């Protein structure tokens, strides 16, 4: 996409442009959606880069706090940590992800046999509902791969409560088109709007609120739901410990790289002198339906950028499908495959299957998790407001965590 060049250089340029705005300007203007050409006036637009870690959360926080006090930049700092919180919350409750994927499959089966549901879903995805702001945002997402965060909340609310469509289909629509589509942030944000994440607490899209925060771009919207109908959902699973990681040994190693974490410094450091690097590029696993071409293009560009920057440390690079990894590693003579840790989501699902296949050949899979994640995720035990009490201490531990 022309608006988001998939390189680390572009990410750093965007961060540099945003840092002066990260204090009071962001706090005052972050909820205003002024249209695709003006998003950068109020928000960072760093999310596609953070999603794939072309730039890291630690880098962003350090850059902002070098210019602003924590008090001044508190709103932005918290928004970055919301992404971290969602990942930690889901990491301890992977059954929520599994249930979402199962529910989505059931709904996709229903679309094949229920013409009315299929027509409503298609109208929503194509921006043909007759609700002007909703239709605009649907088309913006399909064309740009991006949507303002406040618009995402309004959109999800209209999808669930006004159109009466299942939230899982909406979450999937986002995952198929967003450049920053993140399994934790996306799934749990849709659940939150629908009243499932914080039980009974919903987010309702109001005409007056949309008019105010679009500065009149959309006003006088009729027919929006005024009362929520919270969907039925199974009880959330019990919280589990965050998985331990397999230590990296000194045995002959290959790297397995994926788009969830392209800040490769810690992985390369953990496994010097690798036999070769396998590359998992395909993002088709993000949905059972077709992924928007611009998402795959962004991921390909981001991976090429990261691989180019680290090429002298990666050995021969081979594009792989998950089912080919075990044979490839065995052919190299590897006794260990080292990979960046993938939090709960499609890549983690692939890695679990790959680990089973590798084990059958006597090869271990070692996941390298960033200290930033290991320090923050265990605090995502309850709601964000309990988590945010830990933010000052987490910020104090940032120095040295900016490996890229």
Image (tube, rainbow, N blue to C red):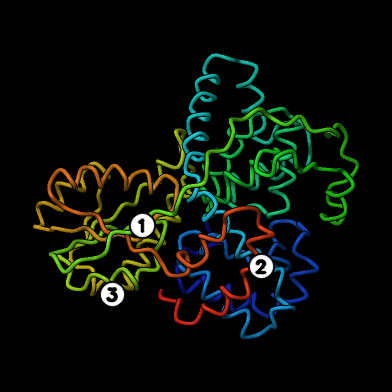
Give the percent coordinates (x, y) of residue 89.
Answer: 55, 52
**71, 304: nearer the viewer:** 71
Give the percent coordinates (x, y) of residue 191.
Answer: 64, 41
Q: Residue at 19% x, 61% y: name it.
A: 254
**78, 132: nearer the viewer:** 78
Secondary structure of the residue carrying numbered label 1: loop
What is the distance, in whole Å, between disc 1 and disc 3 at their CAs?
20 Å
Crowd tier of the residue under label 3, counting other residues whose Cα lies within 10 Å: few below 14, some 14–19, many 20 or above: few
Whether residue 334 is situated above or below residue 181 in the rendered picture:
below
Tell me if 255 is positioned left or right of 52 in this view: left
Give the percent coordinates (x, y) of residue 201.
Answer: 75, 42
Secondary structure of the residue carrying numbered label 3: helix
Whether residue 304 is situated above or below residue 311 in the rendered picture:
above
Residue 389 numbered tag: 2
Most extreme residue toward the bottom is 66
Sequence-wise, the earlier of marks 2 and 1 is 1
Whether residue 245 is situated above or below residue 13 in the rendered picture:
above
The residue wearing badge 3 is: 269
Q: Residue at 74% x, 64% y: name it.
A: 30
Give the percent coordinates (x, y) of residue 358.
Answer: 19, 47
The residue wearing badge 1 is: 244
Sequence-wise, the earlier of marks 1 and 3 is 1
Number of numbered discs: 3
Tell me if 322 is positioned left or right of 370 in this view: left
Secondary structure of the residue carrying numbered label 2: helix
The answer, for residue 2, to whether it is visible in the render is no
* Marks 3 & 2, CB-CB < 8 Å contact: no
What is the distance, in whole Å, between disc 2 and disc 1 at their CAs?
25 Å
Sequence-wise, the earlier of marks 3 and 2 is 3
């Amino acid at each position: 996409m022309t608006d988001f060049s998939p390189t680390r250089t572009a990410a750093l340029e965007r961060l540099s442009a945003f840092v002066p705005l990260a204090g009071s300007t962001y706090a005052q203007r972050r909820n205003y959606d002024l249209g695709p050409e003006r998003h950068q006036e109020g928000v960072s637009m760093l999310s596609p880069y953070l999603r794939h870690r072309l730039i890291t959360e630690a880098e962003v926080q350090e850059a902002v706090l070098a210019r602003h006090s924590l008090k001044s930049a508190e709103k932005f700092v918290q928004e970055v940590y919301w992404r971290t919180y969602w990942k930690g919350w889901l990491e301890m409750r992977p059954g929520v992800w599994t249930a979402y994927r199962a529910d989505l499959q059931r709904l996709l089966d229903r679309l094949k046999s229920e013409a009315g549901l299929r027509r409503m879903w298609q109208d929503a995805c194509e921006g043909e509902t007759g609700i002007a702001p909703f239709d605009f945002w649907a088309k913006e997402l399909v064309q740009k791969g991006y949507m303002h965060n406040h618009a995402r909340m309004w959109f999800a609310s209209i999808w669930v409560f006004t159109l009466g469509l299942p939230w899982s289909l909406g979450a999937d629509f986002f995952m198929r088109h967003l450049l920053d589509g993140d399994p934790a942030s996306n799934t749990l944000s849709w659940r939150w709007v629908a009243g499932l994440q914080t039980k009974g607490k919903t987010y309702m899209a109001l005409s007056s609120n949309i008019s105010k925060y679009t500065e009149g771009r959309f006003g006088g919207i009729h027919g929006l739901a005024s009362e929520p109908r919270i969907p039925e959902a199974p009880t959330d699973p019990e919280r589990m410990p965050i998985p331990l990681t397999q230590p990296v040994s000194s045995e002959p190693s290959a790297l397995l790289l994926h788009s969830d974490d392209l800040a490769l410094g810690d992985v390369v450091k953990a496994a010097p002198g690798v036999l070769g690097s396998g590359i998992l590029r395909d993002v088709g696993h993000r949905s059972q339906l077709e992924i928007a071409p611009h998402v795959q293009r962004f991921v390909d560009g981001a991976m090429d950028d990261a691989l180019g920057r680290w090429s002298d440390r990666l050995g021969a690079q081979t594009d792989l499908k998950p089912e080919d990894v075990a044979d490839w590693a065995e052919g190299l003579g590897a006794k260990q495959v080292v990979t960046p840790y993938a939090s709960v989501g499609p890549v983690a699902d692939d890695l679990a299957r790959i680990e089973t296949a590798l084990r059958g050949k006597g090869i271990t899979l070692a996941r390298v998790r960033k200290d930033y994640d290991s320090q923050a995720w265990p605090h995502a035990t309850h709601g964000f407001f309990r988590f945010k009490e830990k933010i000052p201490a987490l910020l104090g531990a940032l120095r040295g965590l900016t490996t890229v």
